[in-house]
Amino acid sequence: TVSHLYKLRKGGGPGNFPGAGVKGTSHESFVPSTFLQNFYSPQSAGFEQKEGLVPWKLSCLHRAFTDGDISGGLLIDVGSGPTLYQVLSGCEVFSKVLLTDFLEVNRQELKSWLQGEGANFDWTPFIKYVCELEGPSEWTEKAARLREVVSDVLPIDVHRAQPMAPDALPSEGADCLVSCFCLESASPDLDTFTKALGHISKLLRPGGHLLLIGALQESFYLGGPVKIPEQGFTLIRLEVYTSPQYITDTDDISDARGCFFVKAKKD
Ligand code: SAM
């Protein structure tokens, strides 16, 4: 099953799983700056540690978008929250990117960064890291590219049969979906998760790609095979992240200590 992380980890660390931030607080009290500080501040991101979760996520996404099999015009990020790291590789492949979230505060946070307003969260280390993965490139150009190709930040509700406004995307659907730590954060059980996956899959054209990152329960990868619901998708790649610090960690955060990355193609 897909797990849920209930508590915010105190102090932060390179293996923090963003799903925890939402489940442990109600959506009404979601504070983008706190979420960003807990999970994406320099000390939480762990760029220096080879085993950090953020470098792992960025590398999975980089590889997925540079395999050569993903193409098209429109990329949608489902449940963006207040974060942008998940489209840093995709923004080089797609000419149009839509960010989405359930909460207005998160959509505002993203819009504010895109418009270059105020003192926003600093995504520079993330942008620089992806630029290094891509080879010599100027990080300021990627930031400019991102601001150019993200055409909107729109509302979404993965629990609705039609998650986005009908006129928000072309009738054939998007060419690619990315979604990180959203479905399991928003779903109380596997059945709801599976239904939500079915809902967002309607946003994707047949033959389009789905890149899904989420939190896993320990038993998923230590005790048995990983089971990601596959409905109408062909799995291309499944990768699992475990942080050694969590295998020995005895605090009461949760026994969910891993992440999955899935690359799949819609049938
Ligand atoms: N994608 C970001 C990341 O990787 O850190 C944010 C993940 S955050 C843990 C989960 C996000 O799911 C939140 O931004 C929350 O607002 C959003 N969310 C909650 N319920 C949702 C729903 N019903 N439909 C779409 N998004 C939802």
Image (cartoon, helix red, strand yellow):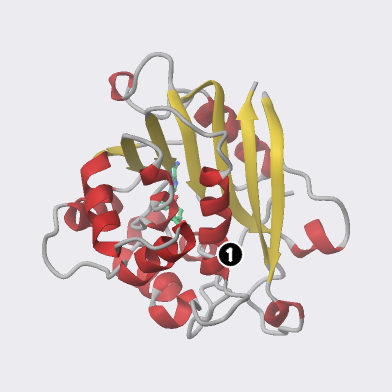
Which residue lies at the image location 51% right of the left edge and 82% below the top edge?
48
Q: Secondary structure at mark 1?
A: helix
Q: Residues within 10 Å of mark 1 (few under 14, many from 20)?
A: some
Residue 89 shown left or right of residue 68 in the figure: left
In-front residue for pair 185/246: 246
Which corner quadrant holds the C terminus? Answer: top right
Instruction: Say above or below: 234 vs 78.
Output: above
Q: Which residue is mark 1?
A: 56
Q: Is residue 260 visible?
A: yes
Comparing 177 with 109, the one in front is 177
Disc 1 under 8 Å from ligand 1? The reply is no
The location of residue 168, given as percent across then percent down, is: 30, 25
From the top left corner, tell me how far across and down residue 114 is, in percent.
Answer: 20, 52
Front residue of this view, candidates 87 and 199 = 87
List the single residue furthest toward the left.
Answer: 117
Is residue 100 positioned above or below 74 on the image? below
Residue 239 vs residue 85: left or right? right
Q: In the image, what residue occupies the spot 37% across and 75% down?
A: 37
Query: Which of the 4 image quarters holds residue 91?
Result: top left
Q: Outermost residue toward the front?
A: 136
Give coordinates of residue 266: x percent, y percent.
Answer: 61, 25
* In this view, 199 is above or below 101: above
In the picture as drawn, the residue positioned furthest to the top comes out as 171
Residue placed at 30% from the left, 53% from the top?
A: 106
The amino acid type of the residue labelled 1 equals Trp
Where residue 232 sits, quadrant-wise, is: top right
From the viewer's perspective, is 71 left or right of 211? left
Q: Is residue 244 above or below residue 130?
A: below
- Residue 84 in the image, given as x and y percentages of width and height: 36, 55
